[in-house]
Image: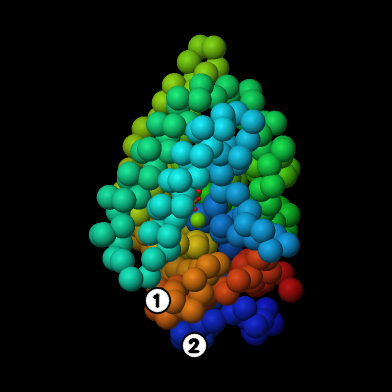
Amino acid sequence: MIRELSNPSVCMKNPGKVQDILLSMQKAGSNTLQVISDFDMTLTRFAFNGKRCPTCHNILDNSRLIDDECKLKLKDLLNTYYPIEIDPTRSAEEKLPLMVEWWTQAHELLIQQKIKKDALVLAVQESEAKLREGYQFFFNHLHEHSIPLLIFSAGIGDVLEEVIRHAGVFHSNVNVFSNYMKFDELGVLQEFKGELIHIYNKREGALLNTGHFRELRARPNVLLLGDSLGDLTMADGVQAMENILKIGFLNDKVEDRRQTYMDSYDIVLIQDETLEVPNAIVRFLTGNK
Ligand code: TMP
Ligand code: MG
């Protein structure tokens, strides 16, 4: 049905279920579809030429906006908490308070650096952030078919927006739920706005945004893209959902996490740095060959 589902990176626990969901969503038509995607390590690459690519936070951590002492502290936090984030032996309940600790400490350090709003553009331009191969088709095709794309990220909204603006794909069908910076009248970072979004409270974040999902109530079919198990709850605010197809990128600790990912996501993409499979699915759902 979709040639790319035979790619070597694709794992499915239940291919029959995937086929049924795809046929049902295709029959309902692309005007009933919405796409909800995580950002870091889902729309962006995990690695390039054997080197890790930065998350939204890392774009700032590695930039000239942060002094060396702060860089070391942020690196210490990453080295402490990232292994916890991807540890398959700990439950989400166990990880949750530790993730809050990570985000809170990282944001406090960023605030101390008095980051200027107008310096973010250069930080993104000078960074090594990379959207996954095939991103132009993904963003442009969804836009051309007026399919809403919600980017739901525990990263930093201001940085994320700049990455997709810089890539020329911040189209009018894109909405972003993320952690946004609040600047004072001189354009200096003061605090982060609203409720903190970390990787294990996306459900709560979704439920706070009922207005967005109410507007999209005529689109009960959802394509969800994520890379963490916390991303599975991003669609919890969708009203009267009919079908959901969950695609998960498994980037790191593959052997330890393969089974859990296969039990949780309908399609698992193993160390696949491209959007080839999501693009093929979007093409199928919009009736394009
Ligand atoms: P996402 O929801 O867009 O994937 O963003 C969350 C990612 O951000 C998650 O994988 C951890 C990462 N992160 C950092 O790289 N550095 C940090 O300081 C923090 C708080 C998170
Ligand atoms: Mg992610």
Q: Are marks 2 and 1 in contact (CB under 8 Å)?
A: no
* Quarter of the image that includes the C terminus: bottom right
Q: Is residue 97 found left or right of 71 in the rendered image?
A: left
Residue matched to label 1: 260
Question: Separation of disc 2 and disc 1 at Cα?
Answer: 19 Å
Q: Is residue 3 found left or right of 243 in the rendered image?
A: right
x, y percentage for residue 82?
Answer: 44, 55
Most foreground residue, 6 or 223:
6
- Tell me what residue is drawn at x 46 percent, y 39 percent: 73
Q: Nearer the viewer, mark 2 or mark 1?
A: 1
Residue 9: image quadrant is bottom right
Structural crowding at the residue carrying mark 2, measured as other residues with C-alpha within 10 Å and reported as few (<14), some (14–19) or many (≥20): few
Q: Is residue 277 above or below residue 235?
A: below
Instruction: Give the numbered dot on residue 132.
Output: none
Residue matched to label 2: 16
- Tell me what residue is drawn at x 73 percent, y 54 percent: 136
- Check disc 1 and give the amino acid type: Thr
Q: Earlier in the sequence, mark 2 or mark 1?
A: 2
Residue 282: image quadrant is bottom right
x, y percentage for residue 77?
Answer: 43, 46
- Tell me what residue is drawn at x 44 percent, y 74 percent: 257
Query: Element type at marker 1?
Result: helix
Query: Element type at marker 2?
Result: helix
Let me know if residue 90 appears in the view.
yes
Q: Is residue 285 found left or right of 137 in the rendered image?
A: left
- Check disc 2 and give the amino acid type: Gly
Q: Is residue 18 above or below residue 117?
A: below
Let me know if residue 138 appears in the view.
no
Structural crowding at the residue carrying mark 1, measured as other residues with C-alpha within 10 Å and reported as few (<14), some (14–19) or many (≥20): few
